[in-house]
């Protein structure tokens, strides 16, 4: 919710919310991402595959990014977490690849 | 064999829950042979009926389940009586304490009678660890150091902190107290599991999911992909849990 203040202040900035709220604040993270379309949720570190699915259902796959937080977190495990979240193949493609490419392509 | 050292049974006041059928179905799907059942705190608040439910489930399916007895230390004499009854009459394989849900500090003196009972009955004590205000690794360490003959299991790797800051405190806790083991459930950073196994002791880590709070299938992944030897992995999967809780 602190990140929400930044998103509100800078509506043209894309803000990637690392760990999607982590262990205790994934619900808050999804809520603020619903409210502020410039917030993108990133999947690393947080231990809840079901919240990844919930984020996709509530804000759309286009605003969810895969990340590993490696080398601390094992990328293989972080990939597996997204794969078992029960998402459609097109959503997985967006989360694993398309979304971050779109963000980085906008960088001048 | 795979033993999940912490699986919650019942419908919790805090919104999570699962039935025995759901637990069994998932265990079959995931290839888990045995689980240590933990009573939830129900909407009615009273833990005794949940302890009976766990005991009854274990009695009916001894090959697949063991069960912990859960008490609220604030209930003082009632809690002690419940623990004693759980150990002596209902075959509980250990005591479960939840400082977060029952709102007590893990090293509060209200726990002392329970620790003495656990020591007397030679039962392990499982603590929902890692909650900063009530079950910080230093608090678990403080409690465990006062009762060196009691085997403690600190849930969640002893720490829940995505910054990784508490990992150091959890390691110091393990270094200071040989009578503490940690679970793998929800552990941020898998290299922590590997580090503890290889540098502190391969008997000091148990596989647990904390299901349904954490995702059982995902939690298995942490062990499956851990960079440890096959022999160490077997200790993670079953050996350490069976040593702590009994076969």
Image (cartoon, rainbow, N blue to C red):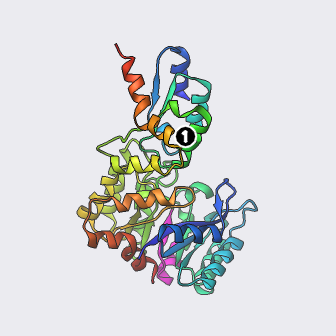
Number of marks drawn: 1
Determine the residue positioned at 63% across, 75% down.
B54
Q: Chain under label 1?
A: A
The answer to whether residue B103 shows anywhere in this view is no
Determine the residue positioned at 54% across, 78% down.
B66
Relative to B161, is B195 on the left or the right?
left
Determine the residue positioned at 62% across, 75% down.
B80
The residue tagged 1 is A25
Residue A79 horizontal/vertical position (percent)? 39, 47
Give the quarter of the figure containing the N terminus of chain B: bottom left
Which residue occupies the foreground of this view, B78 or B188?
B188
Looking at the image, which residue sits at the far front? Answer: A89
Looking at the image, which residue sits at the far right? Answer: B44
Determine the residue positioned at 33% across, 62% down.
B174
Residue B17 horizontal/vertical position (percent)? 65, 60
Looking at the image, which residue sits at the far bottom? Answer: B89
Residue B116 horizontal/vertical position (percent)? 50, 76
Which residue occupies the foreground of this view, B31 or A8?
B31
A99 above or below A92?
above
Give the quarter of the figure containing the C terminus of chain B: bottom left
**Image quadrant assignment for residue B75:** bottom right
Query: Helix or strand or loop: what does disc 1 sit on?
Result: loop
Residue A20 horizontal/vertical position (percent)? 49, 37
Relative to B188, is B201 on the left or the right?
left
Magenta stretch bounds: B115-127
Relative to A46, is B12 on the left or the right?
right
Residue B120 drawn in magenta: yes
Residue A76 drawn in magenta: no
Which residue occupies the foreground of this view, B41 or B5?
B5
The 10 Å Cα crowd at callout 1, few under 14, some 14 to 19, many 20 or more, is some
The answer to whether residue B174 shows anywhere in this view is yes
B38 above or below B194?
below
């Amino acid at each position: 919710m602190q990140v929400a203040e930044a998103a509100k202040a800078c509506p043209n900035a894309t803000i990637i919310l690392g760990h999607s709220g982590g262990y205790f604040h994934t619900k808050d993270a999804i809520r603020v991402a619903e409210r502020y379309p410039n917030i993108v949720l990133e999947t690393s570190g947080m231990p809840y595959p079901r919240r990844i699915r919930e984020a996709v259902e509530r804000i759309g796959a286009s605003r969810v990014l895969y990340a590993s937080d490696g080398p601390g977190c094992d990328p293989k495990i972080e990939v597996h977490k997204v794969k078992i979240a029960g998402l459609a193949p097109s959503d997985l493609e967006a989360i694993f690849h398309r979304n971050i490419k779109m963000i980085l392509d906008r960088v001048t | 064999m795979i033993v999940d050292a912490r699986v919650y049974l019942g419908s919790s006041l805090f919104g999570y829950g699962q039935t025995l059928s759901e637990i069994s179905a998932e265990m079959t799907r995931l290839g888990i042979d045995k689980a240590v059942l933990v009573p939830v705190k129900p909407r009615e608040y009273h833990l005794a009926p949940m302890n009976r439910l766990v005991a009854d489930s274990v009695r009916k399916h001894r090959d697949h389940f063991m069960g912990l007895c859960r008490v609220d230390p604030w209930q003082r004499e009632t809690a002690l009586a419940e623990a004693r009854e759980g150990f002596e009459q209902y075959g509980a394989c250990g005591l479960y304490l939840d400082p977060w849900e029952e709102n007590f500090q893990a090293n509060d003196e209200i726990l002392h009678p329970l620790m003495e009972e656990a020591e007397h009955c030679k039962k392990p004590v499982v603590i929902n660890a890692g909650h900063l205000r009530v079950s910080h690794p230093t608090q678990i360490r403080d409690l465990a150091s006062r009762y060196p003959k009691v085997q403690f299991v600190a849930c969640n790797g002893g720490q829940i902190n995505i910054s990784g800051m508490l990992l150091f405190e959890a390691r110091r806790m393990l270094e200071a107290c040989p009578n503490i083991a940690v679970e793998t459930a929800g552990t941020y950073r898998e290299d922590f599991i590997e580090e503890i196994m290889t540098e502190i002791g391969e008997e000091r880590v148990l596989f647990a999911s904390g299901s349904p709070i954490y995702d059982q299938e995902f939690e298995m992944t942490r062990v499956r992909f851990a960079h440890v030897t096959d022999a160490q992995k077997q200790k993670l999967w079953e050996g350490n849990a069976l040593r702590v809780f009994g076969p």
